[in-house]
């Protein structure tokens, strides 16, 4: 236990020192990793409401106090301004920089939102012997904007973004069982089979990430994706916002196995 | 509680007296109904082994002592020779009669096997707001022989038979969750999507039961079916065998809700 918690803390300290600036996949195995959105306090209440109304794409793991870089619910000694390997800083909806540290742009009114990530349920799938194609292919998961609306809250509004993993039918059924145990990290799929039914015109041209091969006899299986809140925030064009850079997550002290409800 | 148990006992007493000779669907709502196979003791050990090796199509609820018509695990005062509305009697694999009582052909070496039935998980689906097409259409569920082999035991051997219910993808995902809770009554689906992948040539021509309509945007979803043991027994052509007539089940004192593992 001490060993595993130490690996997560070590990843955060390496990000803080600048020793780690790359993606966090496969770091601190067994630990929950999290998506980040940092917003001014004026938008925080509406964004919290948006997460509450859309728990499948926006499973909120923790929210900070305004101005505080600490997230005691996710780990000891977290400084959200330094402990992620790479950030994206946005002004009025425009990406302005991708720094490894955001102390210089920090403000006392900023609120951090940490949202569950598919790494957790993918680990459960792999441990169950289910294939995860983009991991096999060594690329990013394919993600798509759908025609499924999210439930709006204040200015936050927009389509559900989904990630896709191809599976044989029997594996898809097993994946529903396995991922249903993890509602705090996107949970069960939202769709499977015909992509056109959820507004995806071309499965080989994802809107984010990389296309993966769908083999004969496989169905595309779609999960609600943590890119949804990012795309919704981007559409609002807040005067100031910070997110993690894709794949560069917060490594928390929480254990994936503890995310299972059963 | 007393009321509900009484309704099951009442159905059995009506079958026993001859007042009930028709199908048992919708009788004693909330109660587990069961498929029946009665075999000579010489085949019982192998058939028990077959059920153990094939729990999805053959979820064994109870097995009698040789020669005994009682099934205390399924209800008080059960006499399996009289308490089912209609039987089928088979000799050397040939159907010889469809009586409402089998006391006159009873033997001291007969062993009764009671196997879970899809009525239980269909009730859970309906209570969850999921559609069950053959119930909507007022016909039998469509059933198909597949190219999926069962695990053989002694002389018992043959293909898996499945039942099919069409569902939209999101409902299919929910149905996996709902029916996974009921492993003692067939549990989660075994396949969904392309019927050809499990050896079904024409979805509109079921091998048993009636065809149902599959609407645009729906997937066929397939569950292991209690007809599997019947078709496997028929292939062995035992010198003597009794089954229930299709749709004429044993109504037990067990409650469907108690079949849920979670």
Image (cartoon, coloured by chain):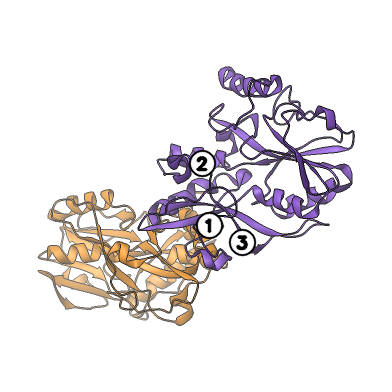
Chain colours: A orange, B purple
Depth order, front residue of A54/B15:
B15
Please identify the quarter of the rendering in which residue B72 is found: top right
Q: Work out whether B57 lies above or below B106.
A: below
* Location of the N terminus of chain A (image quadrant): bottom right
Chain letter of disc 1? B
Please identify the quarter of the rendering in which residue B33 is found: top right
Chain letter of disc 3? B
Pointer 3 and pointer 1 on the same chain? yes
Can you see residue A67? yes
N-terminal label among 3 and 1: 3
Q: Is residue B259 left or right of residue A105?
A: right
The residue positioned 53% from the left and 57% from the top of the image is B205
Residue under circle 2?
A: B122
> Can you give x and y, in whole percent of width and height, for residue B169 in the image?
40, 56
The residue positioned 38% from the left and 72% from the top of the image is A13
Disc number at residue B146?
A: 3
Q: As drawn, which residue projects farthest toward the front? A: B96
Depth order, front residue of B236/B93:
B93
CB of mark 2 within 8 Å of CB of mark 1? Answer: no
Q: Give the structural element (helix, strand or loop) at label 2.
A: helix
Q: Depth-wise, is mark 2 or mark 1 nearer the camera?
A: 1
> Can you give x and y, in whole percent of width and height, for residue A218 in the image?
48, 71
Between the residue at mark 3 and the residue at mark 1, the CA separation in whole angstroms equals: 13 Å
Q: Depth-wise, is mark 3 or mark 2 nearer the camera?
A: 3
Residue under circle 1?
A: B205
Q: Work out whether A165 lies above or below B123.
A: below
Between the residue at mark 2 and the residue at mark 1, the CA separation in whole angstroms equals: 22 Å
> Can you give x and y, in whole percent of width and height, for residue B177 in the image?
48, 49
């Amino acid at each position: 236990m001490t060993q595993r918690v130490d690996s997560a803390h070590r990843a955060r300290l390496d990000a803080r020192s600048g020793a780690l600036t790359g993606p966090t996949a496969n770091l601190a195995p067994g630990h929950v990793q999290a998506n980040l959105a940092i917003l001014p306090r004026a938008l925080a209440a509406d964004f919290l409401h948006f997460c509450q109304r859309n728990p499948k794409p926006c499973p909120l793991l923790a929210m900070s106090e305004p101005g505080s870089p600490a997230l005691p619910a996710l780990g000891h000694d977290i400084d959200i301004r330094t402990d992620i390997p790479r950030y994206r800083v946005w002004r009025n909806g425009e990406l302005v920089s991708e720094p490894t540290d955001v102390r210089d742009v920090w403000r006392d009114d900023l609120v951090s939102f940490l949202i569950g990530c598919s790494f957790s349920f993918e680990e459960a799938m792999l441990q169950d012997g289910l294939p995860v194609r983009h991991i096999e292919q060594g690329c990013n998961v394919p993600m798509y904007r759908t025609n499924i609306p999210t439930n709006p809250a204040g200015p936050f509004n927009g389509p559900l973004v989904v990630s896709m993993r191809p599976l044989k039918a029997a594996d898809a059924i097993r994946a529903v069982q396995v991922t249903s145990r993890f509602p705090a990290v996107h949970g069960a799929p939202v769709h499977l089979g015909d992509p056109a039914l959820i507004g995806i015109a071309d499965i080989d041209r994802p809107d984010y990430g990389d296309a993966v091969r769908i083999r004969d006899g496989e169905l595309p299986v779609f999960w609600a994706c943590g890119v949804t809140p990012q795309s919704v925030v981007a559409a609002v064009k807040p005067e100031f916002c910070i997110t993690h850079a894709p794949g560069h997550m917060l490594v928390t002290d929480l254990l994936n196995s503890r995310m299972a409800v059963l």
